[in-house]
Structure formats: C-alpha cells, structure tokens
Image: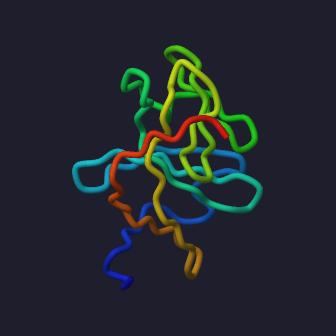
Amino acid sequence: MTDVDFERVCGVGDLPDPGKQVFELGERYVVVFHVAGSFYAIDDVCTHDGGPLGEGFLEGFTIACPRHGAKFDIRDGRVLCMPAVCGTPSHEVKVENGEVFVKIIERPKKKYVWG
C-alpha cells in the first residue's frame, strides 16, 4: 500500500465526534464517520434499495438507512438488520498530521448476513 492510494477527505476537526459526512472519491460516494475518536468509511449505499446511508441516523457504531431502516456497522459495513441482507463495502482510513485520508478498497461483492 502506498500513500498515493489514499485521498484526503477532511481535517480531523472538520467532522464532529460523533459525526458523518459524504465525500465523492472518483466515481464513488463514501460516508466518513467520526465516532469515539476513530474514523471509519463505508459506501454511501444501502444494499437493500440504494438509499443514501449518509442521510441516515447514526447511533454509536450503527447507521440506519433513512428509507426503510436497514442498519449497518460503520466499522466494517456489516449488515445488522433487515430489510438489507448483505453488507456494504468498507474502506481503509488513516489519520496523519490532523488530516483524514480514505483508500477505496475494491472487494468482490460479499453476501455476509448479520453478525
């Protein structure tokens, strides 16, 4: 992994804790979360119907889709409850010198169900 794989999205102080913000990275929209002092990134797409997770309700490490309430773990994209049955992609995040960077991780589509 090289530093060129990472793209700066914001400064640490730009995102409250807890907080979230959507960023466009290439042709992809990613939600970056700041929770309990750490940063996480997942695709801004609910796997149930394509809803915008960045507009959802954040509680702890869980984001709920605003459309039908599917829930995902922001730390790894794992699905936590229906109506979604598979997770959403998660991405690598690093913090350096007060700046937050995200590396898009391309993974084959996984159908991992709750837990």
Q: Residue at x 35, y 45 (%)?
A: 29
Viewer-side residue, 95 vs 90: 90
Q: Which quadrant of the figure contains the C terminus?
A: top right
Q: For the image shown, how many numbered marks are present on the structure?
A: 0
Viewer-side residue, 16 vs 45: 45
Please identify the quarter of the rendering in which residue 64 is found.
Answer: top right
What is the x, y in percent for residue 8?
41, 68
What is the x, y in percent for residue 81?
63, 26
Q: Residue at x 52, y 66 (%)?
A: 93
Left or right: residue 30 versus residue 66 is left
Eyeballing the image, is 94 above or below 65?
below
What is the x, y in percent for residue 91?
46, 59
Q: How is the image coloured?
A: rainbow
What is the x, y in percent for residue 20?
57, 44
Left or right: residue 69 versus residue 107 is right
Q: Residue at x 51, y 54 (%)?
A: 41
Q: Residue at x 59, y 19 (%)?
A: 69
